[in-house]
Image: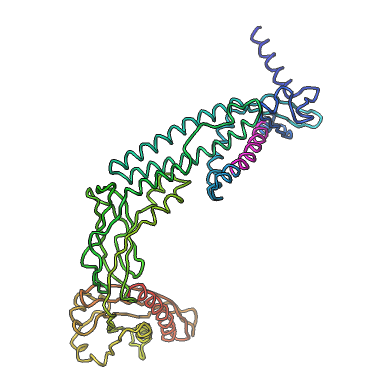
Amino acid sequence: MKRILCVLVVGLFCISAYAGKKRPVWVEKGYHPRYSDKLYFIGIGIARSTGDREKDMRRADDSARAEIAKQIRVHVTESIRDILKQAGSKGDVATDIEVRSRSQVDMVLEGVRIAERYYDKKEKVYYSLAVLNRESAASGIFDDLKSLSKQMKNLLRVGMKKARSGRCWRGLSDIGRAATLLGEIRGKEAILKVVAASPMLMEYQRPPERPDFSEVKNQVDSVLSLMRLEKVSGDNQVAEVGMPLQDPLVVRVTCGGRGEAGVPLNASFKRGKGIIDEHVRTNRSGLARIKVHEVRSADVEENTIVVSYDVDRLKKVDTYYVPDALLDILSAKVVTFRYTIPTKRVLSFVVLVEETNIEDPVDPPVLKPLIEEALAARNFKVIANSAIADHLGEVDIDYARPQAGDIARSFRNVADVVIIGRLKSSFSSKVMEGFYFARAEGVVKAIRVRDGKVILTRRVSDKGAGNTVEKAGLKALESTARRLADSFAQALDETF
């Protein structure tokens, strides 16, 4: 019997919470006498009845919580911009902190509770009153700020300690993390400013002391003053197009005069082209060896390669804020290597192309003149087949499966590069009498005679139509040849 009475009492309480006869003052006027705005945020949520009481109640509750979230977020955004304006920070920094502060606001909202509910039978509307205790929220944020400030100070201290012991790069990593915490701290400070904006919460209006950005920058400057990136060897080499530099480029990173291991570096062509080890790390002695596998550009006599710190590695330490300003300083620390290419020698080419249309030789050829035209346009020397007719008579070339080594040996002392091409068409389909389709395939390879290396390969296929099989094949050949020649020309620009 007692259990039945308890159930009845609880049931009546729940019904009265949503079905009071008199409209509460907070529904009528938007405030509640028990929840002063000096000590509480309040939010009123509304949901029209759909007949599902439980869901309608939840929708009203969610709407009330969202109203508090909206109030806080609007004021936090304004607070962030005021704080950073006073600090002289850029707009993109404000955006970064604003993004981070959103999740922090969500954590504050965990303290929101539903204080009262009301159901208007006449209007068939559910109302919910959500409240957030300002003092409780401010106290939690204040404690978080003290903890973050302590972590930040510790990271700065440890970072400098590492730098003074010869580990500058690792020290910078810790300082970068401290800079990240500074962004998080600023976001929480902006939230605290909003939450504690009451004469009754004066004790929380002055956030805990913490390092500012100038202190972080001064520490970065101190670490950088200990770091040196220096050339050791490999400068002023003489290069040959298509070949590697004879010696590696060697640099050394020191921290307080001692070589530092594990420092990531970038290497890139500032003037010129080629293949290079783009990412390297220093060894235990602080040395890094960078190999230039191939020099490809001969447009200018003097070319340069730049080696710098790989600052992107620091950015991966969750530095959503700051290091752009700090890493700009680090990015400016570079060493430059120079290499020269003797006055450009004109490369000579032999062009050999087999062209067949439905198994018959193509005369005049379609692809060969387009390739020769692309070479001539780039001031390369094209050796006419007629000039080496006797030599060609002694060479047996398998155009279907050209052997680069054999071809290189066959044309030694004749040309620098041999272009081997094959273009052929085949019957594809017959739509009706007098309307045929053919398919063509083309491949071009460039073989460097000096070492027998295939330095570029291009393949293209296309279709053509005509009123005879032969004409369809020719159309396919012409289309394929044009596309293959364009692709070949682009490859020439990338290779030489």
Nearer to me, 242 or 248: 248
Q: Residue 386 falls in which quadrant of the image?
A: bottom left
Q: Dividing the image into 4 quarters, which one contains the C terminus?
A: bottom left
Nearer to me, 105 or 19: 105
At 26% from the left and 48% from the top, the residue drawn is: 257
At 27% from the left and 82% from the top, the residue drawn is: 345
Measuring from the top left, give residue 475's x and y in whole percent.
Answer: 44, 83
Which residues make up the magenta segment?
A: 61-80
Instruction: Judge whether 258 appears above or below 48 on screen.
Output: below
Q: Dividing the image into 4 quarters, which one contains the N terminus?
A: top right
Left or right: 20, with 302 as reference point: right
Q: Is residue 77 magenta?
A: yes
Left or right: 473, with 64 as reference point: left
Q: Residue 110 falls in which quadrant of the image?
A: top right
Q: Residue 64 falls in which quadrant of the image?
A: top right
Instruction: Judge whether 272 appears above or below 320 on screen.
Output: below
Measuring from the top left, give residue 255's x and y in whole percent.
Answer: 29, 47
Nearer to me, 363 or 183: 183
Left or right: 468, with 226 as reference point: right
Measuring from the top left, give residue 421's x and y in whole percent.
Answer: 31, 80
Colour theme? rainbow
Left or right: 9, with 259 as reference point: right
Q: Is residue 414 magenta?
A: no
Measuring from the top left, give residue 88's x and y in whole percent.
Answer: 55, 47
Q: Main secondary structure of the magenta part?
A: helix
